[in-house]
Image (spheres, grey):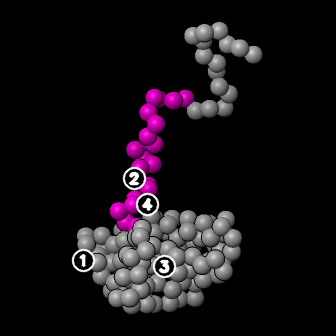
Amino acid sequence: MCWPRGERRDVIASRPSDGSSAPPANNRARRFPRSVRLLHRPEFEAVYRNGRRRTSSQFVIFFRPNGAAQSRFGASVKKALGGAVVRNRIRRRIREVLRIHMPEIPNGWDIVIHPRATVARSEFSPLAIELVGLLRSALK
């Protein structure tokens, strides 16, 4: 069906638009910003080369001081843990734990997190408790 010029068709099941394409301010506060992420391979390699390591039943973390006002995080998920869907789900869960518990994690560190295979099947709450506890104990 053709719509006459100048008329707009009502769209079914869409949210009303306020004209801005940016997410609401309350969503911006909930993000895991790029400034707290390790993004490039040399950053990860520096942590592996010059850092220390701690383990728990579900995680291995590598960490080193970065001399900055905030900690930065990276997650490295092996292909052996599953397909892309599983690996991305693990990454999202780790980022969510870090985002929620950011105030509890000491500042001034570069941290790389290696999850083990059990992370994909674990409940979120015990996973969060274990990761935050490991980070707190390692970064004292």
Q: Quadrant of the C terminus?
A: bottom left
Picture residue at 46% right of the left edge, 36% below the top: 21
The residues colored magenta run: 16-37
Q: Is residue 58 visible?
A: yes
Q: Residue furthest right?
A: 1
Q: Earlier in the sequence, mark 1 or mark 2?
A: 2
- Marks 4 and 2 sit apart, C-alpha to C-alpha, by 9 Å
User: What residue is shown with label 2?
Assistant: 29
- Marks 3 and 1 sit apart, C-alpha to C-alpha, by 19 Å
Query: What SS does tag 1 mark?
Result: loop
- Marks 1 and 2 sit apart, C-alpha to C-alpha, by 24 Å
Picture residue at 62% right of the left edge, 66% below the top: 89
Dominant secondary structure of the residues highlighted in magenta in the image: loop
User: What residue is shown with label 1?
Assistant: 67
29, 46: nearer the viewer: 46
Residue type at tag 3: Ile
Query: What SS does tag 2 mark?
Result: helix
Q: Is residue 36 left or right of residue 89?
A: left
Q: Are marks 1 and 4 in contact (CB under 8 Å)?
A: no
Q: Is residue 135 left or right of residue 92?
A: left
Give the percent coordinates (x, y) of residue 123: 64, 73
Q: Is residue 138 visible?
A: no
User: What residue is shown with label 4?
Assistant: 32
Location of residue 51 with respect to 6 vertically, above or below: below
Nearer the observer, disc 4 or disc 2?
A: 4
